[in-house]
Image (spheres, coloured by chain):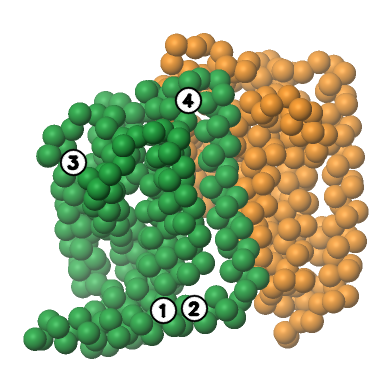
Chain colours: A green, B orange
């Protein structure tokens, strides 16, 4: 009963967040429109870059242009969801820690991280996710790959795993603010690093592949799921679940680091 | 700033692996070898990226917060102030970038190559100094849009992406279809990345060099005049907060 009441409370608060966010979109229409156009341009740069490269070579480590676009599609869906629901607000949390506003969150009768990460969702980022879905549909049709319920379930599973992975990884950048005051630059670096999750995983090998799988797990964000869904590698059940293990591990480490960070937080107003 | 330069190393590392995979079985693609391609992206980092990231944001912030008034009250021209400031800051950015990249260069498996000749190196430095001016002016122009629309963050993203496509920041311009290349060669954007890198690799003739340097100077002067005009017009419609 307590859990149900608690969930109801969180849902009620979250509904308010959505309302606030929608009002922002309506209030700053030009800004919202430009954001959508900007998203389109950013995605276009990758489509152009890959397109021009694939004019010179038919395959890159066994990946065709359409398959790479499929990776891009998964990336845009995953990163779009991240941006919509908590990406922007997590970034804002850094400023809140620096300014001492994070204290107010900690004093509220709900989890501070819920308030800090899930503040008004970014409606403007929705077209990025829609664009990602469009890419996926386009590539599925273009590739002629069988995409049934199993693939759809796999895709949903990987989207959820990717969210766990990305939130855990970016939380490290947020937590650093407890020690350094500001970690905007680190956030920028982490975001920049994450952009390269659009590249097919097979371009890496040996130690680099290990680095980008276990330490900076960008290959698990879009490329690995695409590889499994496209049936590029014959993977066992353990192989399919592998990103979940890594994401859970990262989540545990990231949460422990966050708790340690909070324990060391002296606040800006004390 | 030094922390942010780490991005350059990461970018180069990923692009090295990407292009290594692209070059598998081929030694030359569109006139570039693999080391030349990696060095090309190194040059993108040290030439174009040195000013673009900050100047438009700084200008827009000055306009938005009203800080521009403080400078306008001084006996200095705002355009010269902001471009000079970021132009010089860009040099520090480049030095930081160079230090970090060179520190991590062993991870790039000796892929960074030196200029084709001493003469190329000298010409590259000249092009580097001039294209910094072009880049500063282009980005200041973007920042001046804040006179009319207060928030330019997304507009800046759009223009950055566009300039990245048109300048060769994304991929060398020789990879584009020929018709498109002809158009791109007329525009000023190629002087931001493609032109300095061509000099670095010794891909020039005496005639092309004279023509391109002249055009670069013409574009700098044109943009300078345009920026002055836009600043003048912008200040007419500007209402400061303080």
Mark whose residue sits in front, 3 or 4: 3
Q: Residue at x 78, y 60 (%)?
A: B81
Q: CA distance from mark 3 to mark 4?
A: 28 Å
Residue A29 versus residue A190: which sits nearer the camera? A29
Select label 2 or label 4 by which is in front: 2
Q: What distance separates the C-alpha of mark 3 from that of mark 1?
A: 34 Å
The secondary structure type at the circle numbered 2 is helix
SS for callout 1:
helix
Image position, residue B114 (x, y; %): 59, 20
Give the distance between the C-alpha atoms of the residues marked 2 and 4, in whole angstroms: 42 Å
Chain to which the residue tagged by mark 4 belongs = B
Q: Is residue A249 visible?
A: yes
Whether marks 2 and 3 lie on the same chain:
yes
Badge 3 vs badge 1, beta-carbon distance below 8 Å: no
The disc placed on residue B19 is: 4
On the same chain, marks 3 and 4? The answer is: no
10 Å crowding of disc 2: few (<14), some (14-19), many (20+): some
x and y percentages locating residue B157 in the rendered image: 61, 55
- Co-location on one chain, circles 1 and 2: yes
Which image quadrant: the N terminus of chain A?
Answer: bottom left
Task: Kindly identify which chain the residue marked by label 3 belongs to.
Answer: A
Q: Residue at x 80, y 38 (%)?
A: B187
- According to the picture, the residue beneath numbered tag 1 turns out to be A18
The label shown at residue A240 is: 3
Mark seen at residue B188: none
Name the one closer to the observer, A129 or A21: A129
Of marks 1 and 4, the one in the foreground: 1
The outermost residue toward the left is: A1
Upstream in the sequence, badge 2 or badge 3?
Answer: 2
Query: Can you identify the residue that label 2 sits on?
Result: A22
Residue B39 visible to the viewer: no
Which residue is pictured at 88% across the width and 69% down the height? Answer: B233
């Amino acid at each position: 009963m307590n859990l149900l009441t608690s969930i109801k409370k969180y849902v009620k608060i979250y509904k308010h967040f959505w309302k606030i966010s929608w009002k922002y979109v309506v209030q700053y229409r030009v800004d919202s429109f430009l954001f959508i156009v900007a998203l389109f341009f950013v995605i276009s740069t990758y489509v152009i870059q890959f397109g021009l490269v694939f004019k010179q070579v038919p395959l890159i480590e066994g990946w065709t242009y359409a398959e790479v676009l499929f990776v891009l599609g998964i990336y845009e869906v995953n990163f779009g969801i991240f941006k919509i629901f908590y990406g922007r607000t997590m970034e804002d949390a850094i400023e809140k820690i620096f300014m001492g506003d994070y204290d107010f969150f900690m004093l509220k009768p709900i989890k501070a991280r819920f308030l800090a990460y899930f503040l008004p969702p970014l409606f403007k980022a929705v077209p990025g996710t829609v664009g990602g879905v469009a890419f996926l549909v386009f590539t599925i049709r273009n590739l002629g790959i069988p995409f049934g319920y199993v693939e759809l379930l796999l895709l949903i599973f990987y989207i959820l795993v990717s969210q766990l992975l990305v939130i855990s990884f970016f939380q490290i950048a947020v937590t650093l603010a407890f020690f350094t005051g500001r970690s905007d630059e680190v956030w920028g670096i982490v975001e920049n690093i994450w952009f390269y999750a659009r590249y097919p995983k097979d371009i890496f090998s040996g130690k680099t592949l290990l680095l980008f799988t276990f330490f900076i797990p960008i290959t698990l964000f879009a490329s690995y799921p695409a590889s499994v869904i496209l049936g590029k590698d014959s993977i066992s059940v353990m192989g399919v679940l592998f990103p979940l293990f890594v994401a859970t591990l990262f989540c545990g480490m990231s949460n422990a680091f966050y708790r340690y960070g909070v324990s060391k937080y002296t606040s800006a107003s004390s | 700033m030094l922390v942010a330069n780490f991005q350059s190393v990461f970018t180069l590392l990923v692009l090295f692996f990407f292009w290594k995979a692209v070059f598998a079985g081929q030694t030359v693609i569109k006139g570039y070898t693999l080391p030349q391609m990696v060095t090309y992206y190194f040059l993108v980092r040290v030439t174009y990226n040195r000013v673009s990231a900050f100047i438009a944001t700084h200008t827009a912030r000055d306009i938005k917060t009203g800080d521009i008034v403080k400078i306008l009250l001084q006996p200095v021209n705002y355009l010269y102030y902001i471009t000079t400031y970021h132009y010089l800051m860009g040099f520090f950015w480049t030095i930081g970038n160079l230090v970090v990249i060179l520190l991590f260069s062993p991870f790039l498996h000796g892929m960074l190559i030196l200029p084709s000749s001493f003469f190329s190196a000298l010409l590259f430095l000249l092009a580097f100094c001039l294209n910094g001016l072009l880049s500063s002016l282009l980005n200041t122009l973007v920042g001046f849009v804040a006179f009319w629309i207060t928030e330019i963050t997304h507009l800046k993203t759009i223009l950055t992406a566009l300039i990245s496509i048109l300048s060769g920041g994304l991929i060398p311009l020789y990879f584009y279809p020929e018709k498109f290349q002809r158009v791109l060669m007329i525009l000023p954007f190629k002087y931001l990345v493609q032109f300095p890198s061509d000099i670095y690799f010794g891909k020039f003739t005496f005639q092309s060099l004279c023509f391109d340097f002249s055009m670069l100077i013409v574009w700098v002067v044109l943009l300078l005049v345009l920026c002055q005009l836009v600043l003048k017009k912008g200040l007419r419609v500007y209402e400061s907060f303080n």
